[in-house]
Image: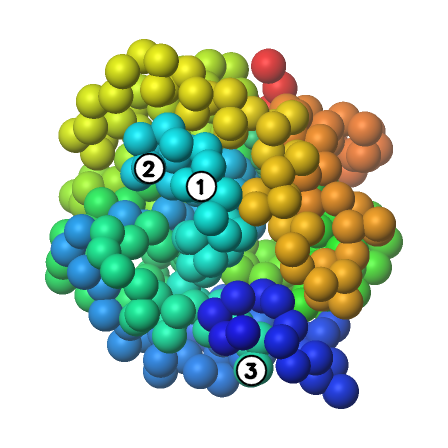
Amino acid sequence: MEGTLSISRMDDNESFLRRKLETLRGVPLFWSIVEKWAKVESFQARPDDLLISTYPKSGTTWISEILDMIYNNGDAEKCKRDAIYVRVPFMELIVPGIANGISQLAKMPSPRLIKTHLPVQLLPESFWENNCKIIYMARNAKDVAVSYYYFYQMAKMHPEPGTWDEFLEKFVAGEVAFGSWYDHVKGWWEKKKDKPILYLFYEDMKEDPKRETQKVLQFLGKDLKEEVVDKILHHTSFQEMQKNPTANYRMVPKAHMDQSVSPFMRKGTVADWKNHFTVAQNEAFDSDYEEKMKGSTLQFRMEM
Ligand code: A3P
């Protein structure tokens, strides 16, 4: 089925798996996105689209489920109508015969929820022309690196991650899918000065999901009864999403995402990096971090 990650015609040669990334204007992306870039670039946004933008592993699925619940007034059954990657299409994901976010979105009625991992400079122009609202969700770099390492292992669209040591080096150098975390979070942060962007943090969402969901409602100009908000928070808790097949990516075939290697809903915590970084890795990471984030007003909490 085009437009989803499910295999309707299981390719005999799964040549799209574990291929090396290609670079587009200095940003490493899946080879098939680079190949079809003209289609992504000319994507037609609509004024009532809501774009969910994130660096991978920053809570994209979580905020997507919250938004779909908001759009459906807290009706959990309606939100189980299909997998999250159908309800909130991944715009730039094009994998021949498997997924095409662009054509999936062209067929979708408004108002659309759209997911992207593109760094701000690569976002199709039509989003700016239409003054679309954007929700950006950021997560601290160390937890993203760990989560991404496990995701690389289970999601076979990525090249092999190598050891944790090797992967961390690549992450710091920005040599992973969608490029440098540092450039991504800073780029979107700067853009928020003159565009309608709500910038959220995963750690804040963990700390107080109700407060953060209220921020989202205010940004959207929506008012929901407290009992509806409570329903949304229950349905989008880690425990609920972990067992929800329309949220936990278990509808994706094992050949593409092997959840026996690592589940998509892995831990959902803050500071799991402490279980992975050695003291030496942490020191090197911190000094490089300081250098890369120098001059930015953007602040992250690495623990709570
Ligand atoms: P971990 O690998 O640290 O567990 P994305 O959706 O951007 O790919 O992000 C996936 C990360 O968000 C995973 O992190 C996943 O467990 C976490 N996550 C997903 N839903 C969550 C929820 N409801 N609450 C907290 N974390 C969640």
Picture residue at 35% right of the left edge, 80% below the top: 39
Residue 270 image-quadrant placement: top right
Are the residues flagged by discs 2 and 1 in contact, CB closer than 8 Å?
Answer: yes
Q: Which mark is residue 184?
A: none
First along the sequence among labels 3 and 2: 2
Q: Position of residue 244 (x, y in %)?
A: 62, 38
In what element is the residue under mark 2? Answer: loop
Most extreme residue toward the front is: 77
The residue singled out by tag 3 in the image is 96
Q: Nearer the viewer, mark 1 or mark 3?
A: 1
- Give the camera-side residue of 185 and 112: 112
For the N terminus, give its image quadrant.
bottom right
The residue singled out by tag 1 in the image is 79
Label 1 crowding class (10 Å Cα cut-off): few <14, some 14-19, many 20+?
many
* Whole-number angstrom distance, CA of label 2 to CA of label 1: 7 Å
Is residue 108 left or right of 263 when viewed as pictured?
A: left
Label 3 crowding class (10 Å Cα cut-off): few <14, some 14-19, many 20+?
few
Is residue 266 left or right of 8 when viewed as pictured?
A: right
Q: Position of residue 280 (x, y in %)?
A: 81, 34
Label 2 crowding class (10 Å Cα cut-off): few <14, some 14-19, many 20+?
some
Say above or below: 243 vs 157.
above
Q: Which mark is residue 72?
A: 2
Q: Position of residue 299 (x, y in %)?
A: 45, 27
First along the sequence among labels 1 and 3: 1
In what element is the residue under mark 1? Answer: helix
* Whole-number angstrom distance, CA of label 3 to CA of label 2: 32 Å
First along the sequence among labels 2 and 1: 2
Q: Amino acid at mark 2?
A: Asn
Q: Nearer the viewer, mark 3 or mark 2?
A: 2
Is residue 154 left or right of 301 when viewed as pictured?
A: right
